[in-house]
Amino acid sequence: MTPRLIVSDLDGTLLGRDHTLHDSTVEVLRALVEQGHHLALASGRHYLDMRVFRDQLDVPMHLISSNGAYTHDPSDTLLDAHHVDPGKARALIELSRPANVRLSLYLDDAWYIDSESPSHLGMHAATGFVYQVVPPREMPSQGIGKVLYGGSPAELAKIEARVREIGGRDLHVTYSTPDSLEIMAGGVNKGVALAALLERIDVKAEECLAFGDNLNDVEMLSLAGEAHYMHNAHPEMAERLGRGRRIGHHGEAGVATLLRERFGL
């Protein structure tokens, strides 16, 4: 059997409603590694946050984190890092916004946020990854993999328009959820990171299976030979992709179900 690369997003895709791995998902992924296939996780989450799930699976896998800003190999070696231009980062940090919109930075080894936000901790409860509160005036502009604004979709739409004016082609703008606007360096996304990984491990794009649910997965799914998006995916996913297969719900281990069928497990 030709070795494949199976790459999956986490929240809304591989993880359940409680942001943890289903037992069936763990079983299936371990079985695929035993068959000789490659695995990777590709998420908007920070690398330190994602590493917990890799350790739980206890199999070799690459980690594409912060929407493609970083790639680590199975031994935790950093393969690629792409930082937001410091001048653009400073402009984003200083961008005026409503008091109820939170600003976060993902650095190489930390998560900074401008104010306490218990709602930001819920999805990270299973990993223990927590933020540090840092006033914007004290936030660095160097070494930033991702800038995030968290708030209502209406407020974020206004901020997005201003971000695009600031960034032009020097920033890549996307959403991981309707209430999370995420900005990386220009040309940084999961698809670009996946292309580099495929070349590194000598697997063709047509031999890659990818799974996702939101707009920050579009480039990755567009590259993969077998693209799958979840039943709970963003309503624009089918239109954005123009291809791919809609599969089960993330809350019902839809990825594991598809992989069992696809590989006869």
Image (cartoon, rainbow, N blue to C red):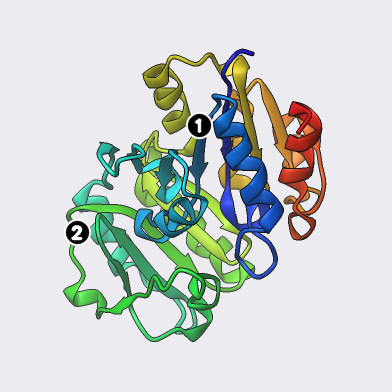
Q: Quadrant of residue 61?
A: top left
Seen in the picture, residue 7 relative to 94 is either above or below; the reply is above
Say whether residue 243 is visible: no
Seen in the picture, residue 1 relative to 234 is either above or below; the reply is above
Q: Give the camera-side residue of 10 and 166.
A: 10
Q: Quadrant of the N terminus?
A: top right
Q: Give the camera-side residue of 149 and 120.
A: 120
| Eye-nearest disc, 2 or 1 | 1
Q: Give the camera-side residue of 74 and 206.
A: 74
- The residue under label 1 is 191
Where disc 2 sits, the SS reads loop
Q: Find residue 230 and report its horizontal and vertical position in percent.
A: 75, 46
Residue at 52% across, 49% down: 174
Q: Quadrant of the C terminus?
A: top right
Query: Which of the marked residues, 2 or 1, is nearer the chain's N terminus?
Result: 2
Would residue 244 appear left or right of 204 to someone viewing this image?
Answer: right
Residue at 43% across, 54% down: 55
Say whether residue 147 is visible: yes
Where disc 1 sits, the SS reads helix
Q: Quadrant of residue 21?
A: bottom right
Number of numbered discs: 2
Mark 1: give few (<14), some (14-19) or many (20+) Cα within 10 Å.
many
Would residue 189 appear left or right of 262 to someone viewing this image?
Answer: left
Q: Find residue 215 and report its horizontal and vertical position in percent.
A: 62, 46
Q: Give the camera-side residue of 169 and 110.
A: 110
- The residue under label 2 is 141
Q: Find residue 237 and report its horizontal and vertical position in percent.
A: 73, 42
Q: Amino acid at mark 1?
A: Gly
